[in-house]
Amino acid sequence: MTTLQQPTTGVSRTAVIIAQARAEEHRRPDRLFDDPLAQHFVDTIGWIQVAQAGRLNQEHFVLRTRFFDDYLRSTTAAGRRQVVLVAAGLDTRAYRLDWPDGTQLFEIDLPGLVAFKQAVLGVHRAEPRCRRTVVRADLRDDWPADLIAAGFDPTRPTAWLIEGLLMYLERADNDSLLERIGGLSAPGSAIALEHINQAYVDLPEMRAVHERLKNVGASWHSTVEDPVAWLAGHGWTASVTPQTALAQRHRRPVPRLTDPAIVDDARMWLVSGERHASAL
């Protein structure tokens, strides 16, 4: 494993930081989710120091993880047995969630990050709890063809998850991504994602974060002011779940940089929705 390029630069670096947050949460007796594999990634790479804003946002990463866990549980319980994790990173949901029988999960990400992840999972002999297929692809290339070649069936309802990605892409690339996802989404498909607005980018607490992201080649390039309207334009009926509601539900403090009482109209959007019948 020492011969592998470790994901400590570019957008892949953020996958490591999220793994750190999940590993810390797993150690809590009142944890909101289990993720025993996260610590293995951290141990292999070594701890990455984050800016103060990153530490303030750790509770957001935790609540976000639980929000998307619950989304995947509910959407598969509703009958969707095909799941796609877009830019899966070091996500281990295939291994730590209880999936309904017949679930087929696809993970899409860059070849280098996939190779690292597969090596760590192999060393620890991790076994997925569903059928898991890895698709090595750059989302700026013809990834739908790669996904279909890997066994994806565009005639089946699909649950899509886009976690911690969209702010790193240009707006045009995000529109293209949603167009491609829409073209692969059968009636009854669902989607969940995270994005940010410009006010969040402009927070004074985020200045050091932007500098660090720039230095490792992982700058933010896009925002969205109305994610519900944006998704509607791509054929999805969606809603936003605020972190205040998640914090209350799980008896956790509201993450400081997502608390409207502190950051006013700055937002890290957590969005979920279903495909418009008229868009099909």
Image (tube, rainbow, N blue to C red):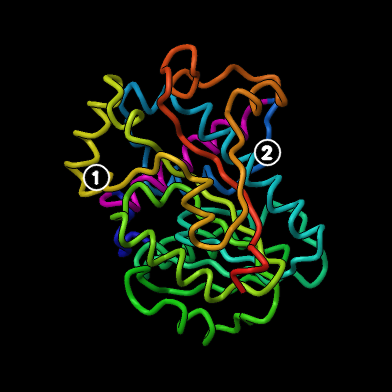
What residue would you read off at disc 1? 219
Q: Indicate which disc residue 113 carries.
A: none
Q: Nearer the viewer, residue 62 or 122?
A: 62
> Which label lies toward us, 2 or 1?
1
Compared with 95, 249 (above or below) is above
- In x, y percent, where is residue 10? 26, 52
Place residue 262 in its image quadrant: top left
- In x, y percent, where is residue 158? 66, 68
Quarter holding the C terminus is bottom right
Residue type indicated by callout 1: Ser
Instruction: Kindly identify the residue that appears in the image at 57 percent across and 44 percent down.
Output: 271
Compared with 212, 221 (above or below) is below
Q: Is mark 1 on a helix, strand or loop?
A: loop
Provide the residue span drawn in magenta: 9-28
Place residue 275 in its image quadrant: bottom right
Instruction: Kindly identify the residue that appears in the image at 46 percent across and 64 percent down.
Output: 178
Compared with 117, 82 (above or below) is below
Q: Is mark 2 on a helix, strand or loop?
A: loop
What residue would you read off at disc 2? 33
Q: Do the residues labelled 2 and 1 touch (CB within 8 Å)?
A: no
Place residue 152 in its image quadrant: bottom right
Q: In this view, does 58 lie to the left or right of 99?
A: left
Instruction: Kindly identify the residue that appears in the image at 38 percent across and 28 percent down.
Output: 54
Examine the structure image and report whether residue 137 is included in the region drawn in magenta. no
